[in-house]
Image: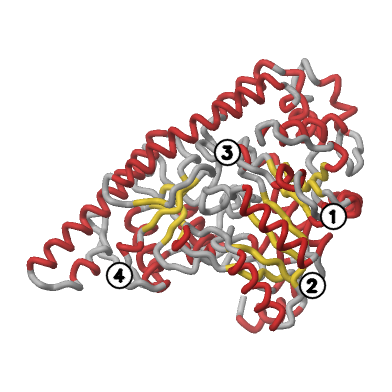
Amino acid sequence: MGSSSATSNRLLLSKIATSEGHGENSPYFDGWKAYDRNPFHPTKNPEGVIQMGLAENQLSFDLIEDWIKKNPKASICTPEGVEEFKNVAIFQDYHGFPEFRKAVAMFMSKARGGRVTFDPNRVVMSGGATGANELVMFCLADPGDAFLVPSPYYPAFYRDLGWRTGVQIVPVDCDSSNNFQITKEALAAAYEKAQKNNINVKGLIITNPSNPLGTTLDRDTLESLVEFINQKNIHLVCDEIYAATVFSSPTFTCISEVIQNMNCNPNLIHIVYSLSKDMGLPGLRVGIVYSYNDDVVNIGRKMSSFGLVSSQTQHMLASMLLDEEFVARFLETSSKRLAKRHGVFTKGLEEVGINCLKSNAGLFCWMDLRRLLKDQTFDGEMVLWRVIVNEVGLNVSPGSSFKCVEPGWFRVCFANMDDETVEVALKRIRTFVRQGKKAQDQAVQVKSPKRWKSNLRLSFSSSSTRRFDQDSVNVLSPHMMSPHSPLVRAKT
């Protein structure tokens, strides 16, 4: 198709369809495309790119599979459960099955240590956390309104929160000087700057536990955030989709616990939840909005008809999540396995002097590669990232795609692969860093301080002599991608 034809065709489409609001023109998604082009396989493609940009919990699938085998009646597609097929397959309204909402409310409580209970009548369904975040925005804000979001934050928030709603994101800058903690000063500065620019701030959205930091917010910080939004009379949306991924102290404190003992307006408090991370079930598209605002619950429920959880999924998960013995075993085992994997991975990095931000939750590490940058700039970060993707063969996500204010930080996921693949990834990282150090030492000997920097552009293929300019990323454009690409599949 010629350029004039393409332009003419775009004029026939809506502004939303032709906008860049999807946010996929980002290194975060470019890394996915690089993986899609050359995916690692231990025997079929051992030199391929290892997917470390996918925050997915694959460490406890055996427990879920075992439960399914022992409970065939939970599925309408088995001889034992087919008698419920008609009741499940016929029309269901957007309230969802009562037993499903009850099961979700119970699981949310268990995932938070049983320190707070949730009302099933406030559970609103949506298609994954992506749909839940968008649903909340549609309920709370108009096009052009804004939400404050502490950085670094999930790159796809631009899509989830703003592409179709027209809502803006106003970053709240956080940095490594205090381990990226949110401060009142940073919040106030971002709010006042927005006000000066005539931007109507409707609320604050936080991820707790944090993506990409893997840290949890303490009670004092949460209380200060509630005080801030209460003062300004704006909303607080708490994305708690990693609540059950906490694997070490401190324990997770959810917003529901905090507001129990505070004098605040509950109509301003909303929770986004999902089973994508805590149970590793993103393909089932279970997203939840839990609001303390009656109007949001009622309107959100009507809006949820655009992205419901399938009745078959509700039916199965209701049985699973109401099995208290299974839930307790799953949560305990998952936490232990995440702790073990996190320990193996971070210790492997420490062997070559790579440190990560101290974390206690999540499916990833916030890796500090600042000392490996050719230049302490975001351009320098991108040079290093291209080397890691193309030559080291790891899809890690650069901090700039998370709107980190400091270059040199990378998110690297560790729970979406088996033990053997983790070892391959660690071996590649260690080889890369050690060869870079060797080049540095040689450069010092010949008094050529810049030489080792260029040698960071290492090749792990004897025949490769590629340069690492912008064009060498070699990623696929969306229209060239396989229909089986993880980018084509919905993600949360």
Q: What residue is drawn where x is 38% and y is 41%?
A: 345
Please give the label number shown on residue 143. 2
Closer to the camera in the image, 319 or 75? 319
Disc 1 and disc 2: Cα gap in Å? 21 Å
Q: Which residue is mark 1?
A: 267
Q: Which residue is mark 4?
A: 374
Amino acid found under the numbered disc labelled 2: Pro
Disc 3 and disc 1: Cα gap in Å? 26 Å
When asked about the image quadrant of residue 386, the answer is: bottom left
Q: What residue is drawn where x is 47% and y is 60%?
A: 178
Closer to the camera in the image, 228 or 14? 228
What's the colour scheme?
secondary structure
Quick check: 355 above or below 374? above
Disc 3 and disc 2: Cα gap in Å? 37 Å
| Badge 1 or badge 2: first in the primary sequence | 2
Q: Identify the element where label 3 is drawn.
A: loop
Mark 4 Cα shell of 10 Å, populated few (<14), some (14-19), many (≥20):
some
Residue 420 at x, y = what percent? Answer: 37, 34
- Residue sitting at the far left: 446
Q: What residue is drawn where x is 50% and y is 41%?
A: 416
Disc 4 and disc 3: Cα gap in Å? 38 Å
Amino acid found under the numbered disc labelled 1: Asn
Please give the label number shown on residue 251. 3
Badge nearest the viewer, 4 or 3: 3
Badge nearest the viewer, 3 or 2: 3
Amino acid found under the numbered disc labelled 3: Thr
